[in-house]
Amino acid sequence: MAGRNFLFVPGPTNVPDRILRAMHRAMEDHRSSAFPELPTGLFRDLNKLFKTSAGQAFIFPASGTGAWEAALVNTLSPGDRVLAPRYGQFGHLWIELAQRHGLRVDVLEVEWGEGAPPDRIEEILTADRQHEIKGVLIVHNETATGVTSDVAAVRRAVDAARHPALLYVDGVSAIASIDFRMDEWNVDLAISGSQKGLMLPAGLGILCASPRALAAREQAKCTRAFFDLGEMIKSNATGYFPYTPAVLMLHGLRESLDMLFEEGLENVFARHQRLGEGVRAAVRAWGLKLCAKAPKWYSNTVSAIMAPEGTSAGDVIDVAFRRYNLALGAGLGRMAGKLFRIGHMGDLNELMLLGALAGTEMALRDAGIQVTPGAGVAAAEESYRSTAAPLAARPSPDAQQPAAGAKPSRAKVAT
Ligand SMILES: *Cc1c(COP(=O)(O)O)cnc(C)c1O
């Protein structure tokens, strides 16, 4: 098929050409004397990304799931209780992983479409007078439902209960796209992966551990081998790894972090907010509903859109791919068939999203979902126009020799 595939699943995301080029290189010796410069810079800059000075970042050749596992097995012992609200498929999978490691998970069921409930967490922790609960597991951005939770509020709940549990946060589809503040929120274990906001292929599981988390490691008895932070700490101290690192991914990560810092993290977050608003405007114009139940849960990295009663989200996804070369995300777990997802994280701009929204709009109609042709695209266009940055003055053609007293011309935009 001519033209690019429109990849709008919420991970893997589009890999910018700049990162692809940075990764297109010959193999090298990961034990050479020159090698440590690369990881050392990455560890330093990952701390900037996680917004932590005291934390320690770890990079595993794995996916986000590996970082989930690393966070748990390095800090907990079989039989330990952890509290985990469940409001989507990723939280569900993390809970299952914890159970397979022999942890006792107090699952707090939350309606899918809502996020972590700080008041209920505070109640449960307050009632746990013996401090049996060792950890609280939160998915910052539940990619399956397009819901972002308030991690700061969860931290306040833990503090209000005067409870010593460690705070574990899955930031896989948040970090590098939505603001994340490890130190300010006192997060103990922050989890990320390479194929979402970091704009890389899948292949890295990234973990950041607080000093408290690293101290908990001394007592933790879960079996760990590949994911043992102890081996990592020893080797990383000199810029090496205990086993062969995914060197090309590390070069890609270098480029990714450079791009994020060049744009400015706060600008990256604002861009995602703006792009997300446009998608939500389109969904409203289609007369459809998001899975997220209230604006405070809206995710700036993924929109999960409910198929109306009697229609199939699977049909929308299928026709979008086969007819328009557009990849949309499917409903996961109990949302299978009920919703489809538009990913809007990573290397993305307005026109790319307008293309995806146009394809979605056509696919919706093809799947028998009545929406007004062009309505979603028009709403998103207006959202983007009304929030676009003001144009900088354009240099006039005779800018070389400005006439005395001449004013620079200024492009005007009609509103
Ligand atoms: C993608 C994702 C993961 C990790 O999945 P992997 O396929 O193992 O990379 C975990 N949590 C969330 C919220 C995710 O979006």
Image (cartoon, helix red, strand yellow):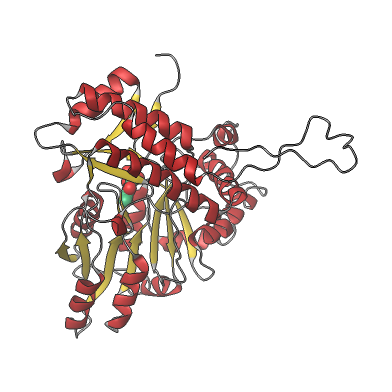
| Residue 291 at x, y percent in the picture | 22, 47
Q: Quadrant of residue 361?
A: top left
- Toward the top, the furthest residue is 1
| Residue 300 image point, x, y percent | 38, 49
- Identify the residue at horizontal 16%, vertical 82% (top origin): 127
Figure disc tally:
0
Residue 308 screen position, x and y as percent: 15, 37
Can you tell which quarter of the image residue 256 is in?
Answer: top right
Q: Is residue 75 visible?
A: yes
Q: Left or right: where does residue 164 sit relative to residue 107?
A: right
323 versus 31 height, above or below: above
Question: Along the line of sight, which residue is nearer the eye, 38 or 321?
Answer: 321
Q: Is residue 54 left or right of residue 123?
A: right
Front residue of 162/165: it is 162
Residue 1's quadrant in the figure?
top left
Q: Residue at x 55, y 60 (%)?
A: 48
Q: Is residue 415 left or right of residue 8?
A: right
Q: Residue at x 10, y 37 (%)?
A: 309
Along the line of sight, the residue nearer the viewer: 292 or 314: 292
Q: Position of residue 288 (x, y in %)?
A: 22, 40
Furthest residue toward left: 310
Q: Is residue 148 in sight in this rendering?
A: no
